[in-house]
Amino acid sequence: MKEGTYKRIMVATDGSRPARKAIESGIDIAKLSGAKIYAVYVVVPTTHSARDFGWEKAAMEHFRNEGKRATGFVEETAKAADIEVESVLLEGHPADEIVKFAEQNDIEMIVMGTLGKTGLDRFLLGSVAENVVRHSKIPVLVVRGENSE
């Protein structure tokens, strides 16, 4: 890969172990190409109707904090590798928000992890990575993590 190939790389993270392998890959590519990394975490809005008890607000705050921890890990890892990095928290459906952010911010590559589930597990859980690959107009590197089941 020649220097300058990519200048803006999104590393989408959910804070999981599979995401860590993707973070490493994204940072390696950024080092080779001199790219800036955008560490992106998508907070999924709660759909419960427990507003009277403050659960929705508390849940959203918890998920935002999880997102800050996840993107903070990317920041620390990128800075240790002398890579410019910016953290971004989004809210909504993860695949939609990842694709939209990439398009609106001239991202040239999306890097993300997956557990590599198949069959019923994938059908029941859905796959953010699969949906990003299907809808993205830019290259997506999906890094398969180790399935710990």
Image (cartoon, rainbow, N blue to C red):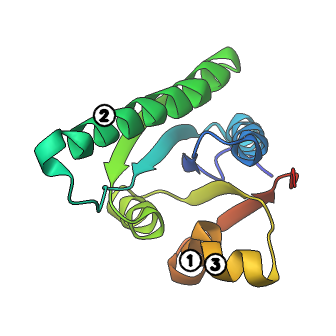
Between 41 and 139, the residue placed more toward the observer is 41
Q: Is residue 83 visible?
A: no
Mark linked to residue 95: none
- Which residue has dot 2 on it? 61
For label 2, the crowd category at 10 Å Cα-Cα, with few meaning under 14, some 14 to 19 and many 20 or more, is: few
Q: Amino acid at mark 2?
A: Glu
CA gap between label 1 and label 3 equals: 14 Å
Q: From the viewer's perspective, tell me whether residue 15 is left or right of residue 17.
A: left
- Which residue has dot 3 on it? 124
* Sequence-first disc among 1 and 2: 2
Q: Amino acid at mark 1?
A: Asn
Rendering quarter of residue 54 = top left
For label 1, the crowd category at 10 Å Cα-Cα, with few meaning under 14, some 14 to 19 and many 20 or more, is: some
> Is residue 79 placed above or below 59 in the rendered structure?
above
Q: From the viewer's perspective, tell me whether residue 72 is left or right of residue 28.
A: left
Q: Amino acid at mark 3?
A: Leu
Q: Quadrant of the C terminus?
A: bottom right
CA gap between label 2 and label 3 equals: 26 Å
Between 29 and 93, the residue placed more toward the observer is 93
Q: Are marks 1 and 2 in contact (CB under 8 Å)?
A: no
Residue 128, image x and y in percent?
57, 68
Q: Is residue 97 visible?
A: yes
- Indicate the secondary structure of the residue bearing disc 2: helix
Between 14 and 99, the residue placed more toward the observer is 14
- Indicate the secondary structure of the residue bearing disc 1: helix
